[in-house]
């Protein structure tokens, strides 16, 4: 028989199936039956809703578990990446004096190290602060305050020696903990690659003390599982030292072989290549050993002295004769190095060399003696990019220049060291010395973010972080993006 359609046949419906009533059973002559609950068949739409609700409950439970383990995951998940250049304002987060900056091994995050207070040591206690930013969105994903862990370690040491001291009273003994460098744990063979930070620091116990405490603080990205190692060091001049992170001890403190005063400081012999040997030994080699790359001391097997640094231009008195060059160009860098396996860490590698380039007039003998630089080691200019920067320094108005090489060594970033907002940062080819791009530091209405110039390339060389002296922003540019 043909099925009869009606105008409601396409609508959702429910079919109810129930047992016959007692009266109907009697009329049919059937024996009494037990009343059964009515069964209801749900429409496909209702069934879909029930499945969706059940699936949503499972997803919410999984999300709650993830957020309990990674509390910043939601922020990163729902924060829309911003187009570069990206501006960071750490002073809004309480960091007004920037000491150092470092990219995570994969370039997804940036750590800024500093404190809230004036960079000049004017008295008073200024706690240290580490801000970790998402390098794609500019969002702050972690705030670490390492002072308490360091003070607790000092307090525990005094307690073991029978002395008592509270952290609050210990804060009054020195104006601040002087942080030097921030490093990310290397990818390499370390199981904690990119998951921990190392902060190197100095603690001056008093202005009249003949010793200070040098140390390393290890933190994970949540600020827990803190470890602090420190070693009393005689205050006899600059030093560099090696730490065994696994054992928590220093393997040696080496006084710097060269100390040139307040403008030039060297703690390690100038080498063309640094190479990690066995048992954590850092070998200083006079042959290059590297073709193009500048190398990464934060986890690299080899690296060169051409780490982010400053071309310092010293000027002697002008009474040395009308034809005697009176300026001296030196290469200055200071950095820390972490072995690829994550076990050994060198702190305080300060290098100084007198730059020698046939295309740039060298300082005269008279100027060298006048500047007490006659014993400086010489360092050949690395490439055409550096030579171009040297040639661009005005003889009558010399200025220092902060520079940083891209990891592959093919591009050099340079910015003058002076307190001027809105000035230019230039990218120069190291092959031919030609200018490739120019970036402009924006003017900021925020309080100044005081710092020595900081230039840091991302590990893959696609982005550049820059902080100019007295400019109140931290900038991240795309490498080929001219402003």
Image (spheres, grey):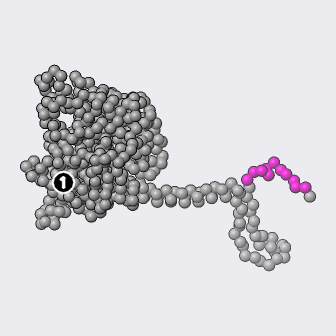
Residue 377, given in percent of the width and then of the height, sits at 21, 41
Question: Count the marks: how many?
Answer: 1
Relative to 364, is 402 on the left or the right?
A: right
The residue at the far left in this view is: 208
Can the viewer see residue 12 in this picture? yes
Neighbor class of circle 1 (other Cα within 10 Å; few <14, some 14-19, many 20+) is: few
Give the residue drawn at x 54%, y 60%. 58
Is the residue 247 above or below the residue 397 in the image? below
Picture quadrant of residue 426: top left
Relative to 46, is 470 on the left or the right?
A: left
Relative to 204, is 112 on the left or the right?
A: right
Residue at disc 1, secondary structure: strand
Q: Main secondary structure of the magenta part?
A: loop
Can the viewer see residue 146 in this picture? no
Residue 214, given in percent of the width and then of the height, sits at 19, 54
The residue at the far right in this view is: 1
Residue 175, given in percent of the width and then of the height, sits at 16, 47
Judging depth in this view, the residue of 291 and 169 nearest the camera is 291
Picture quadrant of residue 397: top left
């Amino acid at each position: 028989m043909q099925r009869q359609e009606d105008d409601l046949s396409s609508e959702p419906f429910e079919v109810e199936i129930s047992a016959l009533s007692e009266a109907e059973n009697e009329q049919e002559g059937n024996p009494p039956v037990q009343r059964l609950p009515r069964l209801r068949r749900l429409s496909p739409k209702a069934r879909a809703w029930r499945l969706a609700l059940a699936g949503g409950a499972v997803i919410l439970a999984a999300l709650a578990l993830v957020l309990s383990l990674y509390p910043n995951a939601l922020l990163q998940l729902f924060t829309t990446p911003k187009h570069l250049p990206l501006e960071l304002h750490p002073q809004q987060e309480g960091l007004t004096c920037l000491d150092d900056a470092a990219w995570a091994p994969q370039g997804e995050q940036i750590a800024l190290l500093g404190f809230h207070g004036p960079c000049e040591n004017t008295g008073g206690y200024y706690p240290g602060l580490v801000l970790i930013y998402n390098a794609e969105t500019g969002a702050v994903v972690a705030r670490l305050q390492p002072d308490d862990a360091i003070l607790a370690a000092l307090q525990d040491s005094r307690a073991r020696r029978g002395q008592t001291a509270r952290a609050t009273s210990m804060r009054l003994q020195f104006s601040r903990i002087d942080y030097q460098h921030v490093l990310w744990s290397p990818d390499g063979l370390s199981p904690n690659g990119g998951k921990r930070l190392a902060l190197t620091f100095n603690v001056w116990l008093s202005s009249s003390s003949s010793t200070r405490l040098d140390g390393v603080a290890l933190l994970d990205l949540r600020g827990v599982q803190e470890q602090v190692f420190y070693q009393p060091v005689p205050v006899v001049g600059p030093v560099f030292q090696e730490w065994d992170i696994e054992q928590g001890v220093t393997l040696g403190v080496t006084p710097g072989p060269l100390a040139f005063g307040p403008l030039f400081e060297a703690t390690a012999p100038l080498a063309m290549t640094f190479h990690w040997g066995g048992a954590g030994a850092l070998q200083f080699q006079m042959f290059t050993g590297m073709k193009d790359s500048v190398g990464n001391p934060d986890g690299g097997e080899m690296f060169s002295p051409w780490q982010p640094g400053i071309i310092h231009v010293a000027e002697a008195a002008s009474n040395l004769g009308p034809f005697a060059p009176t300026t001296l160009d030196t290469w200055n860098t200071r950095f820390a190095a972490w072995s690829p396996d994550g076990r050994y860490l060198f702190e305080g590698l300060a290098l100084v060399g007198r730059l020698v380039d046939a295309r740039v007039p060298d300082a005269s003998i008279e100027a060298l003696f006048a500047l007490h630089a006659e014993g400086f080691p010489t360092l050949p200019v690395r490439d055409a990019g550096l030579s171009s920067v040297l040639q661009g320094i005005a003889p009558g108005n010399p200025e220092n220049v902060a520079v940083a090489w891209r990891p592959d060594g093919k591009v050099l970033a340079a910015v003058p060291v002076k307190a001027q907002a809105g000035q230019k940062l230039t990218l120069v080819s190291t092959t031919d010395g030609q200018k490739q791009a120019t970036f402009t530091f924006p003017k900021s209405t925020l309080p100044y973010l005081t710092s020595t110039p900081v230039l840091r390339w991302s590990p893959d060389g696609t982005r550049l972080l820059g902080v100019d002296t007295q400019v109140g922003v931290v900038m991240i540019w795309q490498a080929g993006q001219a402003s």
